[in-house]
Image (cartoon, grey):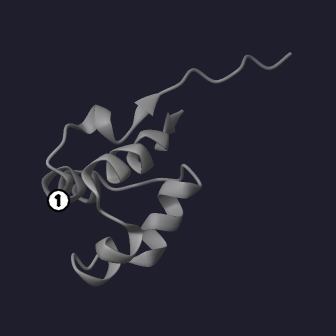
């Protein structure tokens, strides 16, 4: 599973708020909600965030193995 926990830390480190992403960079609020819920995100959106935050993909998301089902 891809999780986006690193996005929030990177935003804080870069001094960019969710408000700023929405109002200054025109990132849709529903996209941010998808990041919060670890839902499907288009690579175009990740690419755009990397440009805005001047960071790498691994600063936004990471792969975490799913727990095996018994």
**Location of residue 63 (image quadrant):** top left
In the depicted structure, whether residue 56 falls above or below residue 37: above
Residue tagged by mark 1? 52
Give the crowd class for mark 1: few <14, some 14-19, many >=20 residues within 10 Å: some
Q: Residue at 22% of width from left, 80% of height from top?
A: 24
Q: Is residue 16 above or below residue 47?
A: below
* Element under disc 1: helix
> How many numbered marks are there?
1
Q: Which one is in front, 6 or 37?
A: 6
Quadrant position of the N terminus in the picture: top right
Name the residue at 30% across, 32% down: 58
Question: What x and y, as percent, mark residue 26?
Answer: 26, 80
| Residue at the right extreme of this rendering | 70
Q: Quadrant of residue 61?
A: top left
Question: Residue at horizontal 29%, vertical 84%?
Answer: 23
Q: Residue at x 19, y 49 (%)?
A: 50
Q: Is residue 28 above or below residue 5?
A: below
Question: Where residue 36 appears, x then y in whole percent?
Answer: 55, 56
- Residue 10 in the figure: left or right of residue 53: right
- Residue 53 percent across, percent down from the top left: 20, 53
| Relative horizontal placement of residue 57, taking residue 30 as reference (left or right) | left
Please tell me which residue lies in front, 68 or 64: 64
Q: Is residue 66 left or right of residue 64?
A: right
The percent coordinates of residue 66 (x first, y second) are 64, 24
Quarter of the image with the C terminus is top right
């Amino acid at each position: 599973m891809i999780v986006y926990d690193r996005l929030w830390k990177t935003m804080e480190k870069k001094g960019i708020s969710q408000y700023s992403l929405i109002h200054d960079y025109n990132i849709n609020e529903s996209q941010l909600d998808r990041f919060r819920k670890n839902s499907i995100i288009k690579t175009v959106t990740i690419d755009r965030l990397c440009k805005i935050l001047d960071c790498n993909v691994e600063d936004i998301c990471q792969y975490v193995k799913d727990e095996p089902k018994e």
